[in-house]
Amino acid sequence: MTVTDTARQAGNSDTLEHLARVGLIAYGVVHLLVAWLAVQLAWFGGGGESADQSGAMSTLAESPIGKPLLWVVALGLIALAAWQAAEVIRWKSGWSASGKQRTKALRKSGNALVKAVIYGALAVLAIRFATGSGQSSSSSQQETTAGVFGWPFGQWLVGAAGLALIGVGAWHVRKGLNQHFMKQIDTSKASPSAVRLVTRLGQVGFPGKGIALAGVGGLLIWAAVTFDPSKARGLDGALRTILDLPFGQILLTLVALGIAAFGAFCLVRARYPERT
């Protein structure tokens, strides 16, 4: 049996699929908590938590069943990462093809690899908060940025990362506006009302998340231009920057609603399989 066959078998495993569904639910819950923290920031000055993934994990950790729940979240996210890693290997056979088949294989592999890294990083964050060693993502990003500044061409690398995030944010906005996300999930067995719900949540959720990601990218570029790692403040800093704009409370609330819609999309998305 080849590595690709093994990856395909792993990707089609019922156990991994069920765990991945748990991961999608966990991913959705994290976004809903981030949205709630953003609303708190907009209207109540925040609750002492960062309005980002670390704040969401900290909020979970402080709940009565927080630590066990964080382990469930981590397990689901690890399953999601493994699922996407299996997709990378599964599409590897198409890298040597030609034409559209090769383009599709490279695109699918690239998307799956990025998702695997994101899910894996969130799983590590959940484990850290479950074990009591979690810290603010903003401070962690500033430390990472300061470290990159010490590399050859580090300032350019930070700026490039910022541009990449802005590009990803724009891609999310475009994906929501043209409803491309519906091509990735199989709703053939869904009712018309369920399809409408998934569509509306995606139309609002993807642009909302895209704006937030673009804000993070903008802060990274500002950090690169000023050669100041303290400017790289992550999602919490991006949301606070939106709050400082004219009509900031309204704008931040709209972004929070978009992030919440994306979270709800992930919850509903867990119901439907991935299209190949």
Image (cartoon, grey):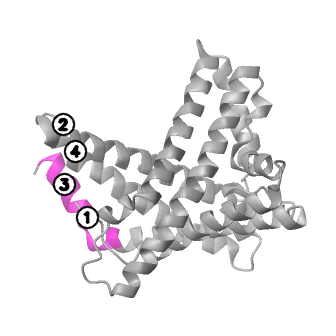
Q: CA distance from mark 3 to mark 1?
A: 19 Å
User: Of the residues shown, which amino acid type is indicated by label 3?
Assistant: Thr
Q: Earlier in the sequence, mark 2 or mark 1?
A: 2
Identify the secondary structure beneath mark 3.
helix
Q: CA distance from mark 3 to mark 2?
A: 18 Å
Quarter location, residue 159: top right
Magenta run includes residue 124 = no
Which residue range is magenta in the image? 2-17
Q: CA distance from mark 3 to mark 4?
A: 21 Å
Does 101 appear above or below 63? above
The answer to which of 63 and 224 lies nearer the viewer is 224
Q: Of the numbered discs in the image, which one, if any, rests on residue 95?
A: 2
Q: CA distance from mark 2 to mark 1?
A: 19 Å
Magenta run includes residue 5 = yes
Foreground disc of the pair 3, 2: 2
Foreground disc of the pair 2, 1: 1
Q: With 87 as the anchor, is 219 left or right in this view? A: right
Residue behind mark 3 = 6
Q: Earlier in the sequence, mark 4 or mark 1?
A: 4
Q: Earlier in the sequence, mark 3 or mark 2?
A: 3
